[in-house]
Amino acid sequence: MIELDEIDQKAVSGLNGFLVRKDLVRTFSRQFPVPTYVVEFLLGRYCASTDQEEIEEGLEIVQRQLKSRTVKAGEEELFKARAKERGTVKIIDLITARLDARRDSYVATLPSLGLKDGNYSPLSA
């Protein structure tokens, strides 16, 4: 368990629920191919507490989310097969989308899956 000094205690009292432990960020950033801000977002969402039990539960959730939604090298075809079998698959990736005026459809690029100009339907609001 981490000892909180006086400044940490003041930060927790004023910003409780918004603090992210950077030591945890480094752990996940090295383990999964995602930008640091993604890890910080997940940790802020599930581990923004000083209660060690809550942090442990949150870490399990973050680990599970990153493990199931990030594509490591060599796993591209596995994720494509899951998408085909299930109809959808949730991944964390940098997506680029644009309108193809000739086909009157949206196309997207998913670099982690090696997909270029994949057709997709826009989400309804």
Image (tube, rainbow, N blue to C red):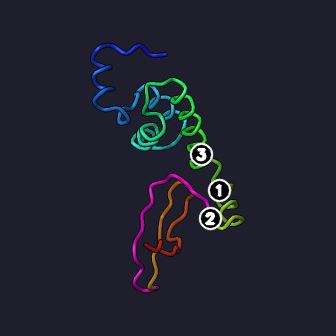
Residue at which label 3 appears: 72
Contact check, label 3 and label 1, Cβ < 8 Å:
no
Given residues 9 and 1, the one toward you in this image is 9
Residue at which label 1 appears: 79
Residue type for callout 3 = Lys
Residue 88 tag number: 2
**Residue 2 in the image: above or below residue 48:** above
Residue type for callout 2 = Thr
Considering only order in the chain, which callout, 3 or 2, is on the residue closer to the N terminus? 3
- Marks 2 and 3, how far apart at CA: 18 Å
Q: Position of residue 3 (x, y in %)?
A: 41, 13
Given residues 16 and 66, the one toward you in this image is 16
Q: Position of residue 77 (x, y in %)?
A: 67, 57
Question: Mark 2 or mark 3, which is nearer to you?
Answer: 2
Q: Position of residue 106 (x, y in %)?
A: 45, 76
Q: What segment carries the magenta color?
A: 89-103
Q: Residue at x 52, y 74 (%)?
A: 119
